[in-house]
Image (cartoon, rainbow, N blue to C red):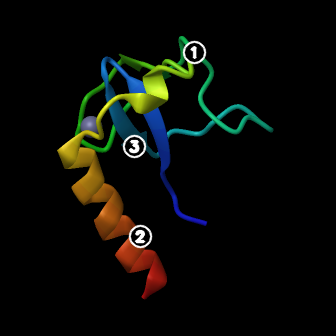
Amino acid sequence: MYQFHWVPANSSRHASTDRRPDGALAYPTGTAVTTLCGKTDQVADNSELAWLWSTCPECYEAALRMARAADG
Ligand SMILES: [Zn+2]
């Protein structure tokens, strides 16, 4: 299990290492998150449409690095 989670926020699909609420599979809509691309106070949008937003390239790169590190 990697340390980050994908989170649609502010019109892009970002990744975040923030803790999710216990038992939640995604950050609930309205959750303030800090993203891997260094943005703070992004507001999560867990709507179906939001998951279709394009991936933030900076978060993608950061997530890739973390995934590779985790895989050794
Ligand atoms: Zn991002």
Tell me the kind of residue under disc 2. Answer: Ala
Mark 1 closeness class: few <14, some 14–19, many ≥20 residues within 10 Å? some
Q: Residue farthest to the top?
A: 30
Residue shown at 27%/47% (left/top)?
Answer: 59
Residue position marked by numbered label 1 in the rendering: 29
Q: Nearer the viewer, residue 65 or 19?
A: 65
Quadrant of residue 66 in the image? bottom left
Mark 2 closeness class: few <14, some 14–19, many ≥20 residues within 10 Å? some
Query: What x and y, as percent, mark residue 7?
Result: 46, 34
Q: Which numbered marker is on residue 67?
A: 2
Considering only order in the chain, which callout, 1 or 2, is on the residue closer to the N terminus? 1
Q: Nearer the viewer, residue 40 or 50?
A: 50
Q: Residue farthest to the left?
A: 58
Count of all numbered marks drawn on residues in the image = 3
Query: What x and y, as percent, mark residue 25?
Result: 70, 39
Quick check: marks 2 and 1 in contact, CB under 8 Å? no
Point out the image quarter for the C terminus: bottom left
Tell me the kind of residue under disc 3. Answer: Ala
Residue position marked by numbered label 3 in the rendering: 15
Query: What x and y, as percent, mark residue 11?
Result: 30, 19
Is the CB atom of the residue marked by disc 3 within 8 angstroms of ligand 1's nearest atom?
A: yes
Above or below residue 43? Residue 71 is below
Distance CA(mark 1)–CA(mark 3): 15 Å
Point out the image quarter for the N terminus: bottom right
Considering only order in the chain, which callout, 3 or 1, is on the residue closer to the N terminus? 3
Q: Quadrant of ligand 1?
A: top left
